[in-house]
Image (cartoon, helix red, strand yellow):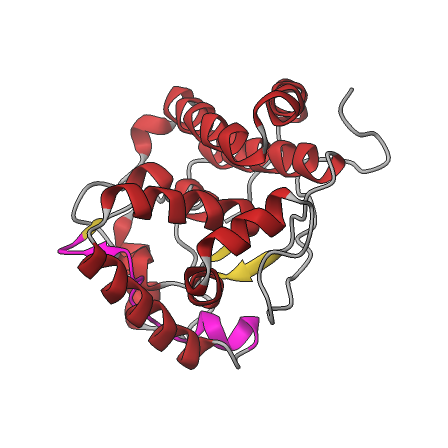
Amino acid sequence: MEIEIDPELTGNIVAEEYAQARREIAALGPVRAYELSQGRHDARLAASRDAHTLACKAGCYWCCYFSVDVRAVEVVRILEFVAKHFSAEQQALLQQEASANAAVLGSLDEMERMRRNVKCPFLVEGRCSIYAARPQTCRNYHATDAAGCQRSFEEPDDFEIEPEFAPVVYQAGGAHVDAFAMALRDAGYEIDAYELNSALAVAMADPQRAKGRFEGKKHALRGLAGTEVPFEFIDEEEPPP
């Protein structure tokens, strides 16, 4: 689906979010700043003028079988949420499922992962069990026709299938994510992306160590090589003020 970028819309979001994120990262630390940024992220999507066209709703979970990448700050935030809201038994089951998924996906490249449907370990009885702390990728995946998502699930080898997206929602979400990531990077924290299950499996083996290393501006996920994600809505030669 072709989307015509609105530079005024995305530029304003980038400037606002970058400035606020930098202030909050410095004052509150990266993880709490990210949690606050998630609230603004959701608000921007909900306020988009085409948000009413979205088909996503509770009980629609085709996309919960698609490949998801996360950054270290997201992993730390998710595990803090899990520690607070999941029982010990639920945490053990989560770790088992994430490890099993990681064994399947860990050796695959990006294109191979796109062809492999694997249930997200947080999908429980048709709903996201970490909805408030769900990754940025999940927050930004919004289709206007769920039939396209279903087809992508049923025919993962067919890359010609293009779910329809709401242009303003897409741009608002992408610009927000880029801005927070740049603020995080400029404050000295890593922003490489990792496959969700592999990142969870490593971090859950020692959550405090992963958090400590991330907050100490070190590589947080032992044994995993991250992938640099280019900014879509930020011109590196003209960064936000």
**Image side of residue 77 versus residue 218, left or right:** left
Query: Residue 21 appears at what percent x and percent y?
Result: 61, 25
Query: Residue 77 appears at what percent x and percent y?
Result: 44, 42
Q: Quadrant of residue 166?
A: top left
Residue in front for this viewpoint, 31 or 137:
31
**Image side of residue 171 versus residue 53, left or right:** right
Residue in front for this viewpoint, 56 or 151:
56
Query: In the rendered structure, does residue 132 fall within the stretch colored magenta?
Result: no
Q: How many marks?
A: 0
Query: Residue 73 appears at what percent x and percent y?
Result: 54, 45
- Residue 145 in view: yes
Q: Residue furthest left?
A: 125
Query: In the rendered structure, does residue 113 fall within the stretch colored magenta?
Result: yes
> Which residue lies at the image location 34% right of the left edge and 77% below the top edge?
100
Give above or below for 197 relative to 69.
below
Stretch in magenta: 109-126
Query: Residue 179 appears at what percent x and percent y?
Result: 64, 32
> Which residue lies at the image location 39% right of the left edge and 75% below the top edge?
116
Give above or below for 114 relative to 91.
below
Residue in front for this viewpoint, 41 or 37:
37
Q: Quadrant of residue 154?
A: bottom left
Say which quadrant the C terminus sits in. top right
> Which residue lies at the image location 66% right of the left edge and 57% below the top edge?
219
> Which residue lies at the image location 51% right of the left edge and 33% below the top edge?
34
- Residue 13 in view: no
Residue in front for this viewpoint, 86 or 120:
86
Tell me the chief SS of the magenta region. Answer: loop
Q: Residue furthest right?
A: 237
